Every structure is written in C-alpha cells, then in structure tokens.
Amino acid sequence: MLSVVSEQATPRLGRNTIFAFRVVLALFWLYDGLVARILFPDASMLEGFGGAASVMELPAGRISAMLGSAEMALAVLVALGVFHHWTCLAQVLLVVALVWLGWPAGGGWLHRVFSVLPLGACLAFLWAYGPGSYSLRPQAKPKNAWTRG
C-alpha cells in the first residue's frame, strides 16, 4: 500500500506543549465549576437543569453545585496528570451529561454539540499524547536488558 506518511510516524510534541494543553483544560474546568456553576449560576442554566431536578428530586441549584464540584475535581486530576485515560473518560461523560442537560444555553442540540467540539479536541489530544511533563503519574521503570520484561 502506498502511503505518504509512515504508520509509525506520529507527530512528536514536546512534553511542555502537552503540559500547556493540560493546564488550559484544567483552568477551563476550574472556571466552569467554580464560577459558572457554584458562585454565579446563570438563571437559564438552572432552568435547563429543571428536568433533571424533577427526576432527582433536588433543587436545580443543588444539581448545579454538584456538577461544579465534579468539574473542580476534574480540574485537579487534569492539573496533576494522574490517571489521564480515566480522567479523559470522566470528562467525556461529564460533557455528554452537560449537553444532555442543556449546556451551553441557547440554540438547539446541534449548537450545543458544536460548542463543545474544541473541548472534545483537547480531550482527544490528551488521550492520545498522555499527561506530558510535570505530572504525578508514576514513571515506568527502565527495563533491564537481562530480563527483557
């Protein structure tokens, strides 16, 4: 098969570039969780949580605070760089839940999906490249040439 790019050739990025993506994503979750969900929740967002509030039998403000707490916990996990695959999966589930609940406000369903595409691209990037530098992830031990294992 004729190919322009080798199958083994993936773009190489510096560990600091990957760390910068991780910081941006952590700041997004921190801002969205603390400011937009807990400190200053928008009335239209709380109204969007009305359906979930009736199912869960909780006030919409409480659901907003719970989502904000989950987003802040994700910000800490992303910033630390631990369990990056599990953290990415949790973020995808949270984004799907937020889109289902009506976030971001305004527009139809398609508008909400396209509004979160940059966030989805950032998540896919971190999934593919790992946490980068400055992470608390345990480093792999170097393999001994004698044991090969």
Image: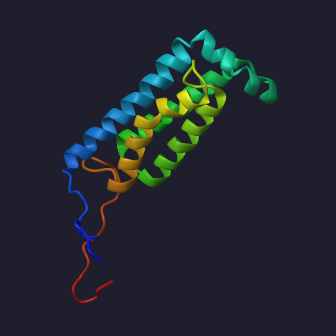
Q: Residue furthest bottom?
A: 146
Along the viewing direction, whichever of 129 and 141 lies nearer the viewer: 129
Q: Quadrant of residue 54?
A: top right
Q: Position of residue 45 (x, y in %)?
A: 61, 17
Q: Position of residue 50 (x, y in %)?
A: 73, 20
Figure check: 103 above or below 143: above
* Relative side of 132 to 75, left or right: left
* Relative side of 64 to 56, left or right: left
Figure check: 42 above or below 125: above
Figure check: 90 above or below 36: below
Which residue is drawn at the image coordinates 52% and 43% (left, top)?
92
Q: Position of residue 31 (x, y in %)?
A: 43, 23
Q: Position of residue 124 (x, y in %)?
A: 41, 48
Which residue is drawn at the image coordinates 31% and 48% (left, top)?
135
Q: Quadrant of residue 75?
A: top left
Which residue is drawn at the image coordinates 24% and 70% (left, top)?
6
Asked if one can make out residue 83 in the rendered structure from this viewpoint, the answer is: no
Q: Quadrant of residue 70?
A: top right
- Quadrant containing the N terminus in the rendered view: bottom left
Which residue is drawn at the image coordinates 53% and 34% (left, top)?
113
- Quadrant containing the C terminus in the rendered view: bottom left
* Relative side of 16 to 121, left or right: left
Along the viewing direction, whichever of 114 and 54 lies nearer the viewer: 114
